[in-house]
Image (cartoon, rainbow, N blue to C red):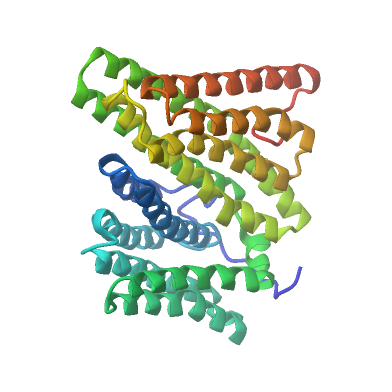
């Protein structure tokens, strides 16, 4: 490992750094609203253009969330009150993003940029609070990573479209490049201070949020349509989201905890970076995109889904399992173990993305439920066999 090893920070006496604090959970409430607002376009104007805008905006939101989560995770010295102040300020910034989201590429682009700038200023202040004394290189990195990018977001407010969107992309790409280019310094922070239990809990809560968007969409769509067919498809939609929840919470959270612990022991900060900062975005984007397909299927069960939503249905599930497969391999799970569950899960879901272009929406969602049922049942059989043979599970989600 390269870079300067950082001194151990004192641990706040009024909170447990290994658990998500109540104020972090309170912050999640506004993040729920933000996810719903981002997915709004998939419900009202489903198209590949809308899907692309959703993915792009979700990328910026995800990057802000993961940066905030990481800085809290490696800051055990933050007292409960200081942490609460940080989360409340972040809550107002994310609230601005939520209000701006439906028109983020329109009249409210300035507010979306202002919210992102505010988050980066907040992150800059927190980083300065405990890293400023580590030398000139650390100061330059901190100022560039959050200070310069905050300025870029602010400057974009004064520019017309699409120049402002270009600056948004530049700001995010700059942060990613700085993160990868300064891997030695990042490794020092990650390996010395990363709290695996807290990080796994925060990611689990975020998955609850994105699954909750699908649940809210299902309830709202059934309530609006109020027909027998809508009710049946609504039940199928809940079964689908339940299957994803079963896969993640009964396997994925433990896999993440044990996988990150092994990576910490091995000193593999780059894989920690990839499996924490980059890969989960694909999983979460796929799950969030499902909500539009489920709502449309409930409203029009006898018609084929619009092409963008058909791709969102099968592709979202495929992306969920494909991302888990890549993460499992990065954690060190053998190919034979990963392929055993990833091949049918990804292959069948990808085929559904094509078939859903012609199938009635109700039938497409029913097929998705069958796919999830097969994958989950197979996982349960394998898990039971492992418990009987060895008394312990694999590090993969299956």
Residue 106: image quadrant is bottom left
Give the answer, above or below, for where 202 lies relative to 353: below
Q: Position of residue 311 (x, y in %)?
A: 45, 38
Task: Kindly identify the residue that appears in the image at 19 percent across and 26 percent down.
Answer: 224
Task: Kindly identify the residue that appears in the image at 65 percent across and 55 percent down.
Answer: 272
Horizontal side of residue 220 vs 121, given as left or right? left
Residue 324: image quadrant is top right
- Give the position of the C terminus as an image quadrant: top right
Give the answer, above or below, for where 67 lies relative to 54: below
- Give the position of the N terminus as an image quadrant: bottom right
Hey, which residue is sitting farthest bottom in the picture? Answer: 136
Q: Which of 64 and 335 is in front in this view?
A: 335
Residue 120: image quadrant is bottom left
Hey, which residue is sitting farthest front in the picture? Answer: 358
Give the answer, above or below, for where 357 lies relative to 189: above
Q: Position of residue 222 (x, y in %)?
A: 25, 23
Q: Position of residue 337 (x, y in %)?
A: 75, 32
Q: Judge whether residue 135 can be spotted in this image.
A: no
Q: Where is residue 184 in the image (x, y as percent from the top left)?
A: 69, 71
Q: Judge whether residue 101 can be spotted in this image.
A: yes
Horizontal side of residue 396 vs 160, given as left or right? right
Q: Nearer the viewer, residue 272 or 296?
A: 296
Q: Nearer the viewer, residue 105 or 199?
A: 105
Counting labels gives 0
Task: Kindly identify the residue that appears in the image at 64 percent across and 27 percent down.
Answer: 344
Task: Kindly identify the residue that appears in the image at 61 percent across and 40 percent down.
Answer: 322
């Amino acid at each position: 490992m390269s870079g300067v090893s950082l001194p151990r920070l004192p641990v706040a006496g009024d909170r447990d750094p290994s658990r998500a604090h109540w104020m972090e959970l309170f912050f999640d409430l506004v993040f729920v609203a933000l996810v719903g607002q981002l997915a709004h376009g998939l419900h009202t104007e489903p198209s590949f253009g809308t899907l692309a805008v959703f993915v792009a905006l979700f990328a910026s939101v995800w990057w802000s969330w993961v940066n905030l989560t990481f800085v809290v995770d490696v800051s055990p010295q933050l007292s409960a009150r200081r942490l609460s102040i940080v989360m409340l300020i972040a809550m107002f910034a994310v609230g601005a993003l939520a209000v701006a989201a439906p028109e983020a590429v329109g009249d409210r682009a300035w507010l979306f940029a202002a919210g992102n700038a505010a988050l980066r200023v907040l992150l800059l202040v927190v980083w300065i609070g405990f890293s400023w004394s580590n030398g000139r290189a650390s100061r330059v990195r901190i100022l560039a990573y959050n200070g310069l990018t905050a300025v870029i977001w602010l400057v974009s407010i004064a520019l017309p479209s699409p120049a402002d969107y270009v600056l948004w992309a530049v700001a995010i790409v700059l942060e990613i490049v700085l993160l990868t280019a300064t891997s030695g310094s990042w490794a020092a922070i990650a390996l010395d201070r990363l709290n695996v239990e807290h990080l796994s809990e925060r990611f689990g809560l975020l998955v609850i949020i994105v699954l909750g968007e699908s649940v809210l969409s299902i309830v709202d769509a059934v309530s609006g349509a109020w027909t027998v067919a809508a009710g049946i498809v609504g039940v199928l939609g809940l079964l689908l989201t339940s299957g994803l929840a079963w896969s993640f919470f009964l396997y994925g959270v433990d896999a993440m905890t044990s996988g990150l612990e092994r990576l910490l022991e091995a000193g593999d900060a780059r894989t920690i970076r990839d499996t924490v900062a980059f890969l989960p975005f694909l999983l979460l984007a796929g799950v969030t995109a499902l909500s539009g397909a489920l709502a449309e299927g409930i409203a029009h069960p006898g018609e084929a889904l619009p092409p963008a939503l058909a791709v969102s249905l099968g592709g979202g599930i495929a992306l969920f399992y494909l991302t888990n497969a890549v993460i499992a391999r990065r954690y060190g799970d053998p190919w034979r173990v990963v392929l055993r569950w990833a091949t049918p899960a990804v292959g069948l879901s990808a085929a559904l993305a094509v078939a859903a272009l012609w199938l009635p929406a109700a039938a497409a969602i029913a097929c998705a439920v069958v796919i999830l049922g097969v994958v989950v049942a197979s996982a349960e059989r394998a898990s039971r066999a492992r418990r009987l043979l060895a008394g312990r599970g694999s590090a993969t989600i299956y």
